[in-house]
Amino acid sequence: MIKPLFLYNTLARQKEEFKPLKKKVGLYTCGPTVYDYAHIGNLKTYIFEDILRRTLEYNGYKVEQIMNITDVGHLTSDADEGEDKLEKGAKREGKTVWQIADFYAQVFKENLQALNIKEPAKYCKATDYIKEQIKLVKKLEKKGLTYQTSDGLYFDTSKYPDYARLAKLNMAGQKEGARVEINKEKRNPTDFSLWKFSPKDRQRQMEWPSPWGKGFPGWHLECSAISLKELGKEFDLHCGGIDHVPIHHTNERAQNWGFTGKESVKFWLHGEFLIMGQDKMAKSAGNFITLQTLIDKGFDPLAFRYFVLQAHYRSKLNFTWEALEAAQRGYDNLIAEIKRLDKPDHNCPEAVRNFSEAVNDDLNTSQALAILQDVLKSNCPSSAKRAMVMEFDKIFGLDLNRFAEKTELSDEVKELIELRQQARQAQDYHKADQLRQELLKKGVKIRDLTDGGYEIE
């Protein structure tokens, strides 16, 4: 009998057995702020979240995954100060914030496709949920959890007794100004903005009327409003990078509690940093690499995925070009070895059991990859090895069968593909998505590449 699924819950600081709240698992994954390209450190997190979803599905659960797209409100400082990142990106490129958001959101989606990351059930743009965000703040205000300053409406964190728990914050230390820049109008250094007022001397490109004045939502507000609207007042899993724990997710948790009066999220999961030397990869530090950079240097995006899977998601992963080259060789060798195998037949039950137990032990992909290598070196029949490769790749997502012979495409399908390419080049993403759905109905799955090309899976 296969052991149950255990996941490391950041809130409890330990592994806990996963049991869903409902028949369908509610999974919320924090999406990108679309003012620039995602870097491969960001993408490491999305790969971990994809492995989580695949593992849940492998265990027989139906999963409803929701991902937000931050297209407003994320300021350049976590202290609720500075310029909106979308406004900054618009100035940098001489475009509107709406154009910036649409462009980088589309590139992000193409990155996910190139890495064989499953799409969420729904992408939710923050700007599409302004009404829900205002409704949430009104309820927090009614409960006496907010106060107003000259620049906006703030959440009073002293009113939430359990505020420090997720990040294990030293609140006494925070009061000495340890975490963020001091805003003299804040009652507590950890208080955070719910609604920011527009500057009086200029008009923002993104601003909305509200009961408190014209302005825009605080960064943390969107995730609470979207997740509670789409997944309900209680849901199973909320994921993101480890850097979200001390501020973003801690503040989300406070908002959720204020709105629902309960602990809304059962499991909080976080992926560790991709580092370069001693530093995390970050756009603010200027030391980031995009997926397109890897492609331009001749690397397969799935070789990067293979590289990420070699380490546990809760471990820091040091990126070097030498390490990526080794991963590319390893991935190529794996493909070459699989090509020599016979058509799939039966599995070896013991190997499948060992594999399942590895991934069910908090997504231990490094151990699961070792089991794959053991299978390939074993005395199992060639056809059984191929069957197990296909089984294991339900989790790995390495597209290990993509070398299989492709069926001849009909003229109609070829025309649809050409029309879709034209729509992509014209940045008519709505039409491109419609054509992609038409192709799926005909059994043709297209994966977009970040260089503008595509692959047929």
Image: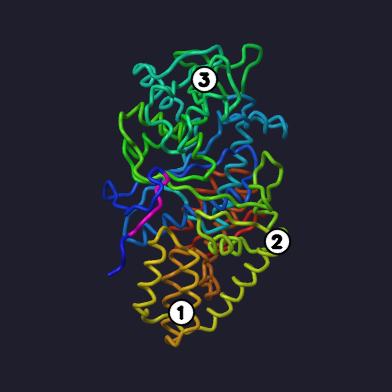
Q: Is residue 175 left or right of residue 17?
A: right
Stretch of the chain drawn in magenta: 5-10
Residue 9 within the segment the image draws in magenta: yes
What is the C-alpha distance between the residues marked 3 and 1?
58 Å
Question: Can you give x and y, in whole percent of width and height, for residue 119 in the image?
Answer: 47, 51
Label 2 secondary element: helix
Query: Of the residues shown, which amino acid type is indicated by label 2?
Result: Trp
Question: Who comes first in sequence, dot 3 or dot 2?
Answer: 3
Residue designated by label 3:
208
Question: For the stretch drawn in magenta, what is the main secondary structure?
Answer: strand
Question: Who comes first in sequence, dot 2 or dot 1?
Answer: 2
What is the C-alpha distance between the residues marked 3 and 2?
46 Å
Residue 290 within the segment the image draws in magenta: no
Q: Residues within 10 Å of mark 2 (few under 14, many from 20)?
A: few
Question: Can you give x and y, in whole percent of width and height, for residue 53 in the image?
Answer: 41, 55
Residue 321 image label: 2
Residue designated by label 1:
375
